[in-house]
């Protein structure tokens, strides 16, 4: 049985127990991804904004608090205070002045960094928490790369804000954490091998041509994908990273194998088989056809879907929108559909799931009203629900093992993206164990300076190229 957002979800089987009393939205103590903000003037402002178009206030995003805040000039040029009255001085991420147009803020002194043990001993960071994940950014001497980089960083900031909001560990290789994350945004050399989008031991490589609408759409059609976006790519690839971090653990690995299959089967052979002849019955058990290629890809696709679901539901909730108040549908999934029917957070997960169905039903039809592709062009099989719940449980376990995320936001009263199947481009996927260093050649000296974006002292914090339309 499948549930499709484009029609009423299927009726619950006659034998199903009564739906649990799942909350329509997450309770206050659940992790949240805040997406609704207002400037000090009252104008609504958005995650990607760095300037209020109504009152010209400067805006900056405080990742640790998941808030976009309007700013007041500080005691020196380039320093800012927050309009919400919280103490401390902030500066813009150094990549704000570059094509990336990052709108995140960095504590102006190490002492502003919560928990900094010895302010004097901590070097001042010029890049924000998201930009510090970069190792290689596009060579800005090449035409079009500035715009590509801006789009990629926007998607990455949304990803990173979600990870922080969910309480997942976001550690950086550049900070000396060997198991940390690292990003290479690279392009193929004219005579060199094609850059393959993929993940290898924490290094996520993205072919920057994916930022071009024409290239991405061509690949989407060529590969028969219903959905292909930068954010979908990043969510999928970071799923591989968190598999290494969370699943490859004695507590979880056998459970993973029971649910997703044995990942020790030959990855290269599995993908070859998939591209030669995809499973015909994939829709019965997998979120996408690519998920049926290998347990690792099933995990990454399911993970990406979980992030889609949580972000969409939290976005709606942060605007005070609870779709199930308006789209009355029976709850078709019950505790019996979960991976673990006794999971204490099962009702919360089911609440999200049903909210997601209600939202996507409306959003799909609204997309069609604009003549666009479906907002959520997938059909979720019932067999994928325990996998999504397994992801949910792992995220909860990771959150419990780590410091809690910041205080949850409150939805504003009165206010009312998949995986893609980021098949690696060209139908020639990179084996997970392939060294992506090969696909991403070492930087030429002139590009190395751009590694990680702006470096200390090279970027003015006063530039303001980054105001995006709402
Ligand atoms: Zn304003
Ligand atoms: Zn930044
Ligand atoms: Zn993958």
Image: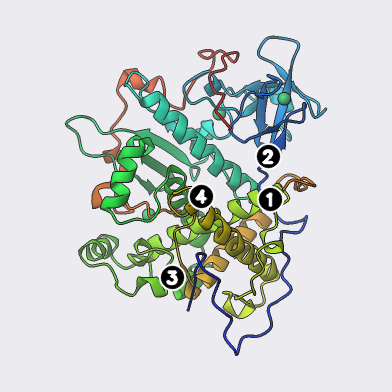
Residue 358 location in percent, x, y? Answer: 61, 63
Residue 371 location in percent, x, y? Answer: 44, 49
Q: Mark 2 points at which residue?
A: 66
Q: Which residue is found at the position 57% from the left and 24% from the top?
A: 467
Mark 2 or 3: in front is 2
In the foreground, 213 or 460: 213
**Quadrant where ligand 1 appears:** top right
Q: Is mark 3 on a helix, strand or loop?
A: helix
Q: Within 10 angstroms of label 2, few (less than 14), some, or many (20 or more) residues?
A: many
Residue farthest to the right? 85
Q: Distance between the residues labelled 4 and 1?
A: 17 Å
Q: Name the residue under label 3.
A: 260
Mark 4 or 1: in front is 4
Q: Within 10 angstroms of label 3, few (less than 14), some, or many (20 or more) residues?
A: many
Image position of 119 (left or right of 158): right
Residue 356 location in percent, x, y? Answer: 59, 61
Q: Do the residues labelled 2 and 3 touch (CB within 8 Å)?
A: no
């Amino acid at each position: 049985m499948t549930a499709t957002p484009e029609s009423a979800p299927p009726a619950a089987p006659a034998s199903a127990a009564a739906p649990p009393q799942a909350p329509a939205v997450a309770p206050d103590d659940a992790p949240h991804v805040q997406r609704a903000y207002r400037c000090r003037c009252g104008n609504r402002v958005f995650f990607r904004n760095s300037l209020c178009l109504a009152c010209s206030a400067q805006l900056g995003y405080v990742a640790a608090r998941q808030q976009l805040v309007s700013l007041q000039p500080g005691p020196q040029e380039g320093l800012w205070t927050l309009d919400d009255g919280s103490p401390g001085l902030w500066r813009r991420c150094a990549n704000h002045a570059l094509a990336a147009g990052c709108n995140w803020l960095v504590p102006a002194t190490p002492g502003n960094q919560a928990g900094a043990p010895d302010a004097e001993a901590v070097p001042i960071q010029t890049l924000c928490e998201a930009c510090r994940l970069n190792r290689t950014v596009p060579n800005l001497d090449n035409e079009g790369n500035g715009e590509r980089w801006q789009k990629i960083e926007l998607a990455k900031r949304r990803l990173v804000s979600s990870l922080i909001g969910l309480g997942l560990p976001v550690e950086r290789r550049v900070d000396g954490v060997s198991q940390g994350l690292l990003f290479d945004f690279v392009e193929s050399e004219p005579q060199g091998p094609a850059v393959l989008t993929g993940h290898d031991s924490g290094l996520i490589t993205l072919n920057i041509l994916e930022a071009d609408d024409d290239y991405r759409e061509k690949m989407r059609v060529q590969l028969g994908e219903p959905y292909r976006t930068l954010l979908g790519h990043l969510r999928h690839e970071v799923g591989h990273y968190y598999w290494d971090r969370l699943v490859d653990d004695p507590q979880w690995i056998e459970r993973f194998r029971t649910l997703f299959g044995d990942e020790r089967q030959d990855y290269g052979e599995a993908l070859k088989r998939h591209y030669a002849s995809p499973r015909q019955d994939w829709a019965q058990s997998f979120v996408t056809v690519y998920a049926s290629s290998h347990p690792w890809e099933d995990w990454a696709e399911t993970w990406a879907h979980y992030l889609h679901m949580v972000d969409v539901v939290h976005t709606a909730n942060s605007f005070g929108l609870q779709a199930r108040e308006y789209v009355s549908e029976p709850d078709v999934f019950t505790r019996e559909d979960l991976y673990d029917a006794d999971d204490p957070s099962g009702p919360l997960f089911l609440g999200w799931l049903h909210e997601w169905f209600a939202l996507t039903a409306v959003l799909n039809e609204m997309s069609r009203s604009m003549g666009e592709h479906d907002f959520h062009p997938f059909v979720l099989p019932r067999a994928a629900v325990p996998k999504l719940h397994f992801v949910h449980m792992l995220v909860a376990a990771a959150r419990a093992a780590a410091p809690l995320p910041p205080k949850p936001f409150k939805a504003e009263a009165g206010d009312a993206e998949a995986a893609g199947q980021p098949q690696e481009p060209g139908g020639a996927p990179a084996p997970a164990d392939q060294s992506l260093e090969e696909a991403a050649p070492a930087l030429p000296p002139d590009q190395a300076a751009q590694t990680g974006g702006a470096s200390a002292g090279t970027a003015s914090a006063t530039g303001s190229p980054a105001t995006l339309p709402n």
